[in-house]
Amino acid sequence: MDNKETQILNLYLSEQNLSQTEIARRLAVNQSHVSRVLHKHGLWRSSQYGKSRTIIIDLYLKSPTMSLTAIGKEVGLSRQRVHQIISDEGIGDQRPKTRMNSRHTNDQIQEAVSQYYDYAPVAKIAREFGVTATTILNWVKRFGSAGSRKRQHGRYGLVSRVLSDSPYANLKDESGFHHSMRARVAAIWLLGHKCERCGNKDLRVLQIDHRKDNGAEERKTLHQAQVYMRVLRCPEEYQVLCANCNWLKRWESTATYKWLEEIKPPSEVPQK
């Protein structure tokens, strides 16, 4: 055993509780060399390391606001090593849940989590609370109740939930229906699945109509599938009309077509 190995062992087993990185820095050697020496002498799980393990577990469970980096500084280990010890012990989910350091109260965070499980868009929740979408997902991961039903991500979960109590519940992707087609069926079903003017229930001719006549502006920013998903989230802004009634509404509300009212239908034109 050379002099460097002796120095490495002495520093590792000293009362200073130094990390491998600190030992390598003091002796001007590579950290991998320090690791090889400790493995060679069977000190990877030494009693000194065991003491650090006990301290880490105690700090992790009793100080929930303390970060892994801060715990590592207390015992002279890296954050990665602290994380590995916690994973080995299987205590990752046993830490008490406390509010993160933020400007939001516990009630606000719980409200955001509740909206997430109610299928509200993550981007919309983030805008409402003034945070990023990643923060919302972190709140759900940390503060979401283990007993809550899991939200199915994307449009599939919301569409399936709407169609669950309808005759179209079995229209799965493998049946040949494209995702946007399932979203269209779900939107029409949610709005009453019949024309509000004439009562036509033929799904083939039913269309989504904007009550505020802002469909042209909406289509500039959303493609068709996104429009259907917006119907599911804001149904009060839309209605169902058949193709005939939808065109009649357009002609009745557009000044460009007013001149058509003066033209008599073919049945009223006198025959020569």
Image (spheres, rainbow, N blue to C red):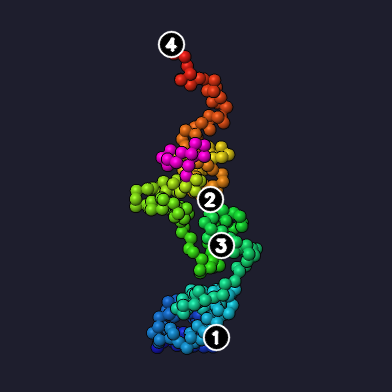
Residue 217, image quadrant: top right
Q: Which residue is mark 3?
A: 113
Q: Which mark is residue 16?
A: 1
Q: Which mark is residue 272?
A: 4
Picture residue at 55% right of the left edge, 79% below the top: 61
Residue 17 visible, this angle:
yes
Q: Earlier in the sequence, mark 1 or mark 3?
A: 1
Q: Earlier in the sequence, mark 1 or mark 2?
A: 1
Q: Which residues are magenta?
A: 193-205
Let me know if residue 204 is in the magenta part: yes
The mark closer to the camera, 4 or 1, is 4
- The residue under label 4 is which amino acid type? Lys
In the rendering, at what x and y percent does residue 263 appear? Answer: 51, 20
Picture residue at 48% right of the left edge, 42% below the top: 194
In the rendered image, the vertical position of residue 44 relative to residue 211, given as above or below = below
**C-alpha distance separating marks 1 and 2:** 60 Å
- The residue under label 1 is which amino acid type? Gln
Q: Tell me if label 4 and label 1 are in contact, CB under 8 Å.
A: no
The mark closer to the camera, 4 or 2, is 4
- The residue under label 2 is which amino acid type? Arg
Q: Earlier in the sequence, mark 4 or mark 2?
A: 2
Q: Looking at this rendering, what residue extends furthest in the top direction? A: 272
Q: Tell me if label 1 and label 3 are in contact, CB under 8 Å.
A: no
- The residue under label 3 is which amino acid type? Val
**C-alpha distance separating marks 2 and 3:** 17 Å
Q: Nearer the viewer, residue 120 or 74?
A: 120
